[in-house]
Image: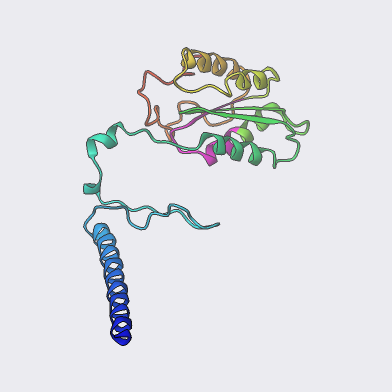
């Protein structure tokens, strides 16, 4: 009797293990099938390893095209501001730099080095910022000490705040009194507008 009981238990365990394996296999097949059938992103890394490259693949029919037209292009503005500031400080003579990243503008305040003229310093700052950001951004720089306080005053703002556009526009107008570097604001290589706003919404275009 005991032998039969033990045998029954062993058979039950065997069936359970086999069933689990089959379930796992079906789940893996389903995941693979979803990717091949266009129901999921291809190899999206939710938690990438240190130093791992970024890779995302979509098929067009995976996306709702109407929703994509309304989708905002998002970047980590804090990380972008940090990266720009650190890169500029690598240059000799630059001791103090502050960077503000909005939805379509980069505002950089800096203390100019003694061994560069203002135009040269502005060009270095402007081109460094442009080299690190998506092409829809427009860069404005200033070596006026007051610009540090100006951009810090909106450092906790959001793009949805009341009068946000007017405040940013006012700061840009003041910054443009300083040298701006050699990349013109209406450079043909720079888009007139970013993906998140229309051509009439972009601040800072008035002189």
Q: In this view, does 42 lie to the left or right of 55?
A: left
Name the foreground residue: 27 vs 5.
5
Name the foreground residue: 174 vs 148.
148
Q: In this view, does 128 lie to the left or right of 32?
A: right
Name the spot of residue 101 as percent of width and height, x first.
Answer: 53, 30
69 falls in the magenta region: no
Name the foreground residue: 54 vs 96.
54
Give the magenta part as a residue range.
126-141
* Residue 84 occupies quadrant: top right
Q: Residue at left 67%, top 22%?
A: 148
Name the spot of residue 19 as percent of width and height, x first.
Answer: 27, 71
- Looking at the rendered image, the quarter that the N terminus falls into is bottom left
Residue 56, above or below 143:
below
Q: Residue at left 28%, top 63%?
A: 27
Residue 33, above or below 15:
above
Residue 3, above or below 56:
below
Q: In this view, does 91 lie to the left or right of 42?
A: right
Residue 63, above or below 147:
below
Q: Is residue 18 left or right of residue 95?
A: left
* Residue 186 occupies quadrant: top left
140 falls in the magenta region: yes
Question: Residue lying furthest front in this view?
Answer: 1
Question: Residue lying furthest right in this view?
Answer: 114
Name the spot of residue 100 as percent of width and height, x first.
Answer: 57, 28
Q: Residue at left 56%, top 35%?
A: 78
* Residue 119 occupies quadrant: top right
Name the spot of residue 35 as percent of width and height, x first.
Answer: 27, 58
């Amino acid at each position: 009797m005991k032998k039969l009981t033990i045998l029954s238990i062993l058979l039950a365990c065997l069936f359970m293990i086999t069933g689990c394996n089959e379930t796992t296999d079906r789940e893996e097949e389903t995941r693979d099938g979803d990717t091949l059938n266009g129901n999921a992103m291809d190899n999206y890394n939710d938690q990438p390893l240190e130093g791992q490259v970024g890779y995302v693949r979509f098929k067009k029919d995976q996306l709702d095209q109407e929703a994509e037209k309304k989708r905002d292009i998002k970047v980590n503005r804090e990380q972008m501001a940090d990266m720009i500031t650190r890169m500029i400080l690598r240059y000799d003579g630059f001791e103090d730099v502050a960077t503000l990243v909005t939805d379509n503008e980069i505002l950089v305040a800096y203390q100019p080095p003694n061994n560069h003229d203002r135009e040269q310093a502005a060009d270095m700052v402007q081109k460094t910022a442009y080299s690190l950001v998506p092409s829809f951004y427009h860069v404005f720089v200033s070596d006026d000490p007051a610009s540090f306080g100006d951009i810090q005053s909106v450092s906790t703002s959001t793009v949805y705040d009341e009068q946000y556009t007017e405040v940013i526009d006012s700061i840009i107008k003041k910054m443009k009194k300083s040298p701006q570097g050699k990349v013109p604001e209406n450079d043909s290589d720079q888009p007139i507008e970013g993906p998140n706003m229309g051509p009439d919404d972009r601040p800072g275009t008035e002189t």
